Amino acid sequence: MQHTSTQDTLVGLFVAAGILGLFFLSMKVSNLSSFVAEDSYTIIARFENSGGLKVKSPVSAAGVKIGQVSSISFDPKTYQSVVQMNINAQYNTIPTDTSASIYTAGLLGEQYVNLDPGGSEEYLHQDSAIEITQSAIILEKAIGQFLFKSAAEKK
Amino acid sequence: MIRILQYLGKSTRTSFTKLGRATYFLLQTVSGIPSVLLRPRLLLNQLYSVGVLSFLIITISGLFVGMVLSLQGYYTLSDFGAEESLGIMVAASLVRELGPVVSALLFAGRAGSALTAEIGLMKATEQLSGMEMMAVDPIKRIVTPRFLAGLLSMPLLAALFSAVGIIGGQIIGSGLLGVDEGAYWSQMQAGIDFNDDIINGVIKSVVFGFVTSWIALFEGYDAIPTSEGVSRATTRTVVNSAFSILGLDFILTALMFGE
């Protein structure tokens, strides 16, 4: 029976290696480990223009990721972009007069929401809205303004 | 003219009857699953010959594919100063496409052809009819364990392929080309989604395992019982498996990753 038990061991080793591979893929390669058992609360911000912001774009404060965008929708009454963000429950001391702006990581990188905390003693909670927002900078618009301005100066 | 039509009609008829036989064969195979699960020894033997013996070729190919991806990706990405995205590039192409597809192609060449030859030869030497004479169902005894083994091994092999490839890409990327190791992993984790990428990759590999084992076993079982017939069946297994894998991959990708 020596042969069968070696075979058993090898099959066991194979299955273990395969499962280890799957485990490696889910834990080390994908984002599964970053949102396991995380409590979060939702806040809303209205932007004039949310640019290239996407669902799952990061939300950061002082350069640290504290949450992610959960949905982006268009409000047909105010013609604004309504961005919902899930913020980690451990960061529950964000003042109500915080301002939200959409920045780009690097020159051509992805866009993210940056929160600049204000000085209020009251804190944001579930479903509260950020009042002060700054839209995404649209590169074409900025270049257009720059060209227009330099043409006007030449005259 | 009539002859051409006749030929067309005949080939349509034969391909339909073959499809019918293959479907019937599949149903018989699947209906044998409970009786195989009661005797796991049969399954274990096949897991050994289908899975364990494919282990080495899959891991070594995975390592080299990952290393090549990393090397080629680096040359293109460094033109744009985006070397840090190497990790996500290697991981996304491996997990979504190359892992399931290349390991399924290798699996068809390594294990599928062996299955066809084995069963075809059993048929040619009348071992299958001998079993029927002893009132042993050859499908339950021979075919189903091999089918199940292929179905189980394929996702494991594909996961191994991707995992080893990503590690190989990291060895080349940060060891040889000087991409920051932290950036390699963090960009990867930011870009690869568990549900969208990993799970879809696993679904793909299960589908490929199913199709490859089905084709291999059916071609063997359906082979003309001569040495030439077995050799033709083996060729057909590899060719048809490759076609089905690549065609299905396109369809699955369009379904899964289309927006």
Image (cartoon, rainbow, N blue to C red):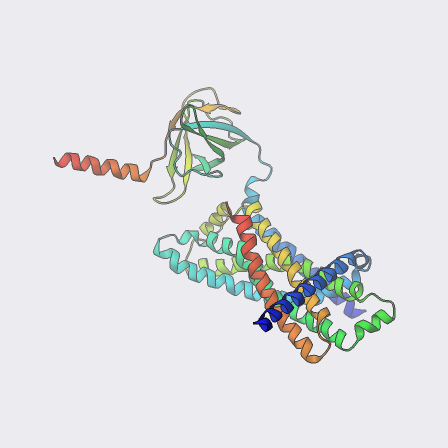
Q: Is the residue B153 above or below the residue B115 in the image?
A: above
Where is A22 relative to A93, above or below?
below
Residue B19, percent across and down? 68, 62
- Toward which corner of the image does residue A114 lie, by quadrant? top left
Looking at the image, can residue B95 be seen?
Answer: no
Residue A125 vertical position relative to residue B61 in the rendered view, above or below: above
Where in the figure is residue B173, as x and y percent of width and height? 45, 58
Query: Percent x, y for residue B32?
Result: 79, 59
Q: Position of residue B174 (x, y in %)?
A: 45, 57
Q: Nearer the viewer, residue A49 or B90?
A: A49
Residue nearer the viewer, B210 or A143: B210
Identify the residue shown where x is 73% and y is 69%: B221
Q: What residue appears at the point 57 percent right and 44 percent down from the top-left corner?
A: A32
Q: Quadrant of residue A137?
A: top left
Seen in the image, is B28 located left or right of residue B50? right
The residue positioned 66% from the left and 59% from the top of the image is: B210
